[in-house]
Image (cartoon, coloured by chain):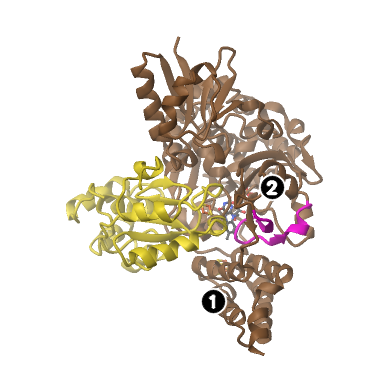
Chain colours: A brown, B yellow
Amino acid sequence: MSIRVFIPRDASALAMGADAVAGQIKTEAEARGLAIEIIRTGSRGMAWLEPLVEVEGANGTRFGYGPVAPRDVKGLFDAFFLAGGVHALGVGPVEELPWFRAQQRLTFGRCGRIDPFSIHEYRAAGGLRGLDAALAMRPEAIVEAVTQSGLRGRGGAGFPAGIKWKTVLGAAASQKYIVCNADEGDSGTFADRMLMEGDPFTLIEGMTIAGLAVGATKGYVYIRSEYPHAFAAMERAIEVARSAGVLGPCVLGSPHAFDIEARLGAGAYICGEETALLESLEGKRGVVRAKPPLPALQGLFGKPTVVNNVLTFAAVPFILSEGAKAYADYGMGRSRGTLPVQLGGNVKRGGLIELAFGVTLRQIIAEFGGGTRSGRPIRAVQVGGPLGAYLPSHQLDVALDYEALAAIGAMLGHGGIVVFDDSVDMAKQAKFAFEFCAAESCGKCTPCRIGAVRGAEALESAIKGEKRAENLALVADLCTLMRDASLCAHGGLTPNPVESALRHFPEDFGARAALAAE
Amino acid sequence: MSDIAPWNHTVAQAVIDALKDREGAALPILHALQECFGYIDEAAVPLVAEALNLSRAEVHGVLSFYHDFRRTPDPRRRIQLCRAEACQSLGCETLVQHAAVHHGVTPQGRGSVRLETVYCLGLCAQGPAALVDGAPVARLDAGRLSALINGAPVEAVLAGEEA
Ligand SMILES: Cc1cc2nc3c(=O)[nH]c(=O)nc-3n(C[C@H](O)[C@H](O)[C@H](O)COP(=O)(O)O)c2cc1C
Ligand code: SF4
Ligand code: FES
């Protein structure tokens, strides 16, 4: 029997040369007359080990080697890595690694383990059990299970998924839609991408369950164009799901129809905002809509629509197969279940870490991340993407929980954590927040469109030491205006990074230039 | 990229016809046209407008809203460099300077490659990151970026053979 070798094709592995490694392993095995089967998988989420090559041992244990470069391949064969042999790149049984064992992988349990496009492997690894369960339930019972699980939207706002679904279920309409928000524009986030590339059937299953729950027959996955691999993976997985009868006129042989189409965004951060996303799906400019009406009642093409993030849908199969309580047993307070944390930036061991809510930022950065990549002290950590606050190192004992972060003026967002060492210039970061806001503004309202441009100019002047006090006062006023008067959270939350940088790192904002000028 | 065809009315019409019956077909059509020709020719605007029952102004509005759509051909190698926060923490701005100083390449369009700014590629734990004609490259540094600007194959750069 041939030995199974697993090599990721996740973008994070491709970006480190995984294709060449796979080619080299194939060539070398042939040259040595060794029978192997190469299976391309998603990523386990250990970004610093990519490409992480895994070899399956006799009892199914998977031995990891990483990061593997093409030039390492001969040496790996010489060290009998196909039999789990000792080599400098060896990390031992992958699932026994402390980094891995300390996690609770409810959503990402299969990611990196199975062939993402084999529905057979998916089912063998527990997939489709949630959909099986849902097919035997009434819509109200599915919605009730999601509500009882405490699942909150993972896209940023943390709105309870069950309540949204209930609204759509209760709306009478000839057509309803399920829309998956896979725009994942926040810097420092990549969980949606990883799931779509590594375990796309979980998303398909979650969306199909949502369709059954609210009475929708059509779903869209809106994927940003910066993710060409995720888009291709979703298209392929949808095709496979269709030919396996998971999608189509009779979902798993039932009288229920559901189908999905993947759609590509076109490079606009604001299209992650749900109403701009719906406009974009309708073929229009991605301009934010005024709410109400809620998308749940008048969403895509004016029809009742569930809009949820990738991770929200992807949590649903577990809830249906294991029960709402099994999911709600994880977490703290009103943040139930697990959060796929994405650790990035200047960190030694970045990647995807799925944990029950409640772990502290410091634990994640120190224990999982191993400190900064540069080896210098941590100075600031941005949580929750470009609209999230910058935290100084003394605030890192905060728990990852929607309410705990809100209490210190921060937000969890989509779960991205970006680490900066002491070489960071926080005035530049604050100015970038304004510039990003201006560059990606949809243009509909003045506080955001004009305020962000003025804010960047005022900060620039203050940093140079020109009329420092006046300019910083102007920045403060602009922040208040943007927070209070922006139509959506793009303009409304941009003050978060700006004000937190000013509050915690005032020494970076032109104090020196001002002193020198005096 | 070599697989790009010159603008051709008949081909464009066929591309549009194949997609126009989808719900909200504008973005799929524009993406398909751009994939086919490398840009969206002015002559495509009335065709798209006609097929989707929109005004030309509306099609222009959509085209100008999205960063992805190009109005003129550009055959140069495309390097989409991430300049968002996680890559900033790992020095992507130094790379922008490097490209300008050593190669005369700027995100404003100058130079031998098409350097574009993007905000996040989902490779935030391995920055600085870029997509090179669609192929992801992580852990960029000045040497690797120079090699890519000078036309080295992505595989060679990833294998560390660029020097
Ligand atoms: C500027 C802006 C950008 C956003 N980007 C995203 C995004 O990329 N992905 C996402 O799921 N939600 C994003 N959201 C949140 C969505 O508007 C919406 O709350 C979410 O899709 C609802 O799904 P959920 O309840 O499952 O989180 C963004 C919101 C704003 C204001
Ligand atoms: S806050 Fe900005 S992005 Fe949001 S609606 Fe206003 S202009 Fe558009
Ligand atoms: S911030 Fe650069 S890849 Fe995400």
- Please state which amino acid type lies under the numbered disc 2: Ile
Amino acid under disc 1: Val
Please state the chain letter of the residue tagged with numbered disc 1 in the rendered image. A
The magenta stretch spans which residues? Answer: A376-398
- The numbered disc on residue A90 is none
Residue A213 placed where, x, y %?
62, 37
Magenta run includes residue A395: yes
Q: Position of residue A306 (x, y in %)?
A: 59, 46
Measure the C-alpha gap from mark 2 to mark 1: 34 Å
Residue in the image at 62% along x and 62% along y: A387
Q: Is residue A370 left or right of residue B95?
A: right
Q: Position of residue A329 (x, y in %)?
A: 78, 34
> Is residue B107 at all visible to an observer of this figure?
no
Look at mark 2 in the image and give the residue it sits on.
A365
Residue at the disc numbered 1? A453
Instruction: Residue at 54% x, 63% y: name it.
Output: A288
SS under mark 2: helix
